[in-house]
């Protein structure tokens, strides 16, 4: 079987999105399949390695992917994608032969608390963002040297942004809103620092006014050069666009369940 992204799409289409699996031809390279899935869904989490299941695996970490294989799984990696888990690797079949497998299962994230219009400073928006995305991984970049970054930029940075980078690392919310690991300074002449961006070339910035970065408003610079300002911090802004269908930059219309797609996962 020649593996391409089109092949992967065809294979996934054959599986019941609510939960299904298939054993693949023995000559298929499981690593090549994993690489194609990683190109599509980001860095995976390893659930089973050499027949041993990660003891931290539970319902929030893709355990449903292992159900069809019982104790026969040899190596299984998992990806989160909206309300679905996708897994691949190898498992022994009922005759004891190790074969490549592809599996999907439903992914459930606890319903996040609704975001009320008047919620603000008294909410831990980073904690809310963790809940919304179903994030269960350890901090991806806990040792960022912020003093060096801030010295290089010539300014302190908002606390919630630094927590986002430390917690989630390099990747994108809903595989769409990419989190910059260090603010871009391309719009500094306009008083803007860019902390994220989308594939539609919208830039998510702060207007760096005043000495307290935690009070900087979010500004969205659209691809056509128009600016829209929001009186909130970055984590609150991301929470709102993920789950508020009435927000002008909402992502809620695309997915009911949200996630953070890692580009480089610490496994």
Image: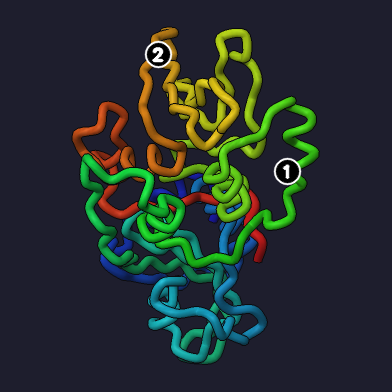
Q: CA distance from mark 1 to mark 2?
A: 28 Å
The image quarter in which residue 139 lies = bottom right
Q: Indicate the secondary structure of the residue bearing disc 2.
A: strand
For the rendered model, the colour scheme is rainbow
- Tell me where residue 27 appears, x and y as whole percent: 61, 66
Crowdedness near tag 2: few (<14), some (14–19) or many (≥20) residues, C-alpha within 10 Å: some
Q: Report the residue at 37% width, 21% height from top.
A: 229
- Dot label at residue 146: 1
**Residue 21 visible in the picture:** yes
- Residue at the spot of label 2: 227
Q: Indicate the secondary structure of the residue bearing disc 1.
A: helix
Quadrant containing the N terminus in the rendered view:
bottom right
Foreground: disc 1 or disc 2: 1
Tell which of 53 and 139 is nearer to you. Answer: 139
> Mark 2 or mark 1, which is nearer the start of the sequence?
1
Vertical position of residue 153 compared to residue 161: above or below: above
The image quarter in which residue 237 lies = top left
Vertical position of residue 196 compared to residue 74: above or below: above
Give the tally of numbered discs.
2
- Tell me where residue 71 appears, x and y as whole percent: 50, 91
| Image side of residue 150 versus residue 122, left or right | right
Crowdedness near tag 1: few (<14), some (14–19) or many (≥20) residues, C-alpha within 10 Å: few
- Tell me where residue 18 appears, x and y as whole percent: 26, 66
Q: Report the residue at 56% width, 85% height from top.
A: 55
- Find out whether the residues at labels 1 and 2 contact each other: C-beta distance under 8 Å: no
**Residue 36 visible in the picture:** no
The image quarter in which residue 176 lies = top left
Quadrant containing the C terminus in the rendered view:
bottom right
Tell which of 138 and 149 is nearer to you. Answer: 149
Q: Report the residue at 56% width, 32% height from top.
A: 212
């Amino acid at each position: 079987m020649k593996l391409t992204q089109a092949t992967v799409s065809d294979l996934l289409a054959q599986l019941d999105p609510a939960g299904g699996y298939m054993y693949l031809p023995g000559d298929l390279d499981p690593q090549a399949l994993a690489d194609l899935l990683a190109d599509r869904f980001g860095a995976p989490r390893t659930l089973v390695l050499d027949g041993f299941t990660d003891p931290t695996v539970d319902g929030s970490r893709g355990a449903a992917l292992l159900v069809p294989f019982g104790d026969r799984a040899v190596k299984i990696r998992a990806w989160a994608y909206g309300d679905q888990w996708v897994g691949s690797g190898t498992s022994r079949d009922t005759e004891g032969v190790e074969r490549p497998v592809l599996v999907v299962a439903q992914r459930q994230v606890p319903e996040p608390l609704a975001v009320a219009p008047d919620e603000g400073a008294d909410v831990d928006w980073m904690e809310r963002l963790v809940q919304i995305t179903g994030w269960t991984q350890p901090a991806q970049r806990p040792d960022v040297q912020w003093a060096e970054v801030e010295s290089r930029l010539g300014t302190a940075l908002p606390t919630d942004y630094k927590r986002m980078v430390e917690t989630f690392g390099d990747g994108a919310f809903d595989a769409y809103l990419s989190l910059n690991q260090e603010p871009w300074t391309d719009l500094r002449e306009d008083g803007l620092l860019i902390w994220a961006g989308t594939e539609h070339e919208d830039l998510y910035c702060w207007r760096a006014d005043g000495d307290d970065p935690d009070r900087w408003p979010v500004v969205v610079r659209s691809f056509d050069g128009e600016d829209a300002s929001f009186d909130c911090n970055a984590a609150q802004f991301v929470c709102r666009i993920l789950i508020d269908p009435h927000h002008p930059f909402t992502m809620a219309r695309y997915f009911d369940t949200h996630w953070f797609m890692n580009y480089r996962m610490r496994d």
